[in-house]
Image (cartoon, rainbow, N blue to C red):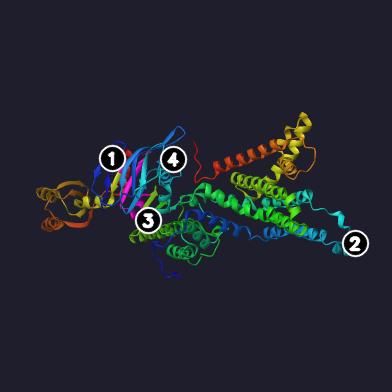
Amino acid sequence: MAVYRRTYTSYSGPLTSAWSRCLVLFRYSRRNLFRSKIQTGLFVLCFFYPLLCLVGIYAVHNLSFLERLGANGQSITIDNKFFFVFINVQGTLAFVLTAFMGPGLISPDIANGALPLYFCRPFSRAEYVLGKASVLAILLSQITWVPGLVLFAVQSSLAGPEWAWQHLWIAGSIILSSLIWIAILSLLAMALSAWVKWRIVAGALLLAVLFFGAGFGQAINGVMRTHAGHFIDIVYLMATVWNSLFRIDSERSMSSTAAWIALLVYCGICLALLVRKVRAYEVIK
Amino acid sequence: MSTAIQSGAAEGTSQRTVAAPQTPVIELQDLSVRFGRREILKGLVCSLRGRAIGLLGPNGAGKSTLINTLLGFYKPSSGSARVLGHDIRTQIRTIRSLVGYMPENDAFISKMSAVSFVQMMAELSGVPEAAALERAHEALFCVGLAEARYRELGTYSLGMKQLAKLAQAIAHGPKLLILDEPTNGLDPSARQRMIRMIREIRDSSQLQIVLCSHLLRDVEDTCDEVLILNKGRIAHYSNLEEERKANKRFLELETCGANGDFTEAIEKLGCECATIGNRLKMILADGVEVRDIYGIAAERDVRIRRLNFRRDTLEDIFLKAMEG
């Protein structure tokens, strides 16, 4: 390493391709996130339930194993409800993980005025958001639809091709339900951290948006005797979408189409907030 | 050093054109920038080719806005500009790949070590990972942060943060280095170090520098060309090198024992003189050398205590531009 050079020298070596620079941001942000032992521990914790499900699937197809444990083999059924519960549990864990990891992605850059340093390079705002969002998207994918598909594949291999063919739609539901949840969580976390700047406050605000949104929505429904309050309850909207995707029969006061539209509107609002805040310098008109 | 300035939007702008073969560093083509109703930059026209260009002006003159527009952070409301021959409207990515930028305000990532920070910035500019690490170490050595390069940036003093900003600006080997108020908040010794470093980088002849400051001394110490902005217009353009050469015939003398006879003798040589107490200001006539003045003084037993070539300081130029 030529650290003995103490004077300025120009660079004339090769350059990386423009598309690969998003990955630079992904690499550094991911490295920063896993510096925290709590966050690493939390991430590892997210794999316990999929492992439990894996054992459950194995056990259902090995009755002798269940009998040895003294359980009834018919008590567990691997169907759409099984995967619905799996997505619910992993979705909750994804939310907790986002509350810890999400606000740390953009807020330090904004708080320390680092954005001009990113954007004075051949690196656009869209690439910046994409690079930062990819960190959350890949992490959350690793604990939602990826293990979901692994469980589906294991179940298919044990139950046979007929089961797999009949329940192929479940694989699609796992992917789609995870992706919309990941998109909502990532965008919400980044938009809040871009506006609030303080990491801890942004994390608290993310919790507040989901929990107080639910409470506030219920209050509106109760006071005004309407169902419109559900539109500000992201958890309710998400549950409606998941119910319809996994074909779970439950009485919902809102159609799945309306819930889809509402969630997409939330994604749009978060993107608009990011576009407004993620820029080198704020223009005060 | 060849320089050129074609015209300025403001009255009183110098108009000078010197043929220059190389591509201008910055070419402003009737550039205007508007934020809402406020027009910040008003039809700037000029072409700058210096090795180190100083952007001067009082607070709110539009210096930082001009830099931010050249970097594509703000969109021009009319007109355009070219940086190293590339249009800011259509080739901003190319411009950004050629430029290193040191912003005015604090800009760092607190939980990162200086090496990681500079390496990441170099990688974002397109330098491969291994080369970026090497360049990061070199840049930090170059700016004098070698000992502290593994420390987190959040623990750095203000002066060290400024140096780290400079390191990230040069790590990817830019063709043009834009420095926005590089000595902001530095103590005198740190300021000296920063100025020395900028001069070293300038003298390496591998890149050109645009230095934006409201501190005349910083610009005078480092730049050979100065563009003065005032209220969003070009107030004055000056080539400091040429200015220094052009003023070689202005003399300022401090004498002892001089009387009207001494002044008369000098005026007989064709020089213009003005006396203030024991000080004498003069413009040397063609063919008259300093040794002639010493000769006249010796004949009349006048002692010359001090003799200076009087030239307009940047402060004089700046004040004149502000009055204009």
Report the front residue among B78 and B168.
Answer: B78
Report the front residue among A52 and A78.
Answer: A78
Q: Which residues are magenta?
A: B215-236
Q: CA distance from mark 3 to mark 4?
A: 23 Å
Residue A256 appears in the rendering: yes
Q: Are marks 3 and 4 on the same chain?
A: yes
Q: In terms of image quadrants, where is residue B16?
A: top left
Q: Mark 1: which secondary structure?
A: loop
Q: Mark 3: which secondary structure?
A: loop
* Residue displayed at 63% across by 48% down: A186
Residue at which label 3 appears: B175
Residue contact between numbered discs 1 and 3, judged by CB atoms under 8 Å: no
Three-letter amino acid code of the residue under disc 2:
Gly
Three-letter amino acid code of the residue under disc 4:
Lys
- Image x and y of residue A42, in percent: 71, 58
Q: Nearer the viewer, mark 4 or mark 1?
A: 4
Q: Nearer the viewer, mark 1 or mark 2?
A: 2
Q: Are marks 4 and 1 on the same chain?
A: yes
Q: Are marks 2 and 4 on the same chain?
A: no
Residue at which label 2 appears: A70
Residue at which label 1 appears: B7
Three-letter amino acid code of the residue under disc 3:
Lys
How dense is the environment of label 3, judged by Cα within 10 Å: few (below 14), some, or many (20 and up)?
A: many
Q: Are marks 1 and 3 on the same chain?
A: yes
Q: Chain of mark 2?
A: A
Q: CA distance from mark 2 to mark 4?
A: 73 Å
- Image x and y of residue A14, in percent: 43, 61
Three-letter amino acid code of the residue under disc 1:
Ser
Which of the marked residues, 4 or 1, is nearer the chain's N terminus? Answer: 1
Q: Which mark is residue B75?
A: 4
Q: Is residue B223 within the magenta segment?
A: yes
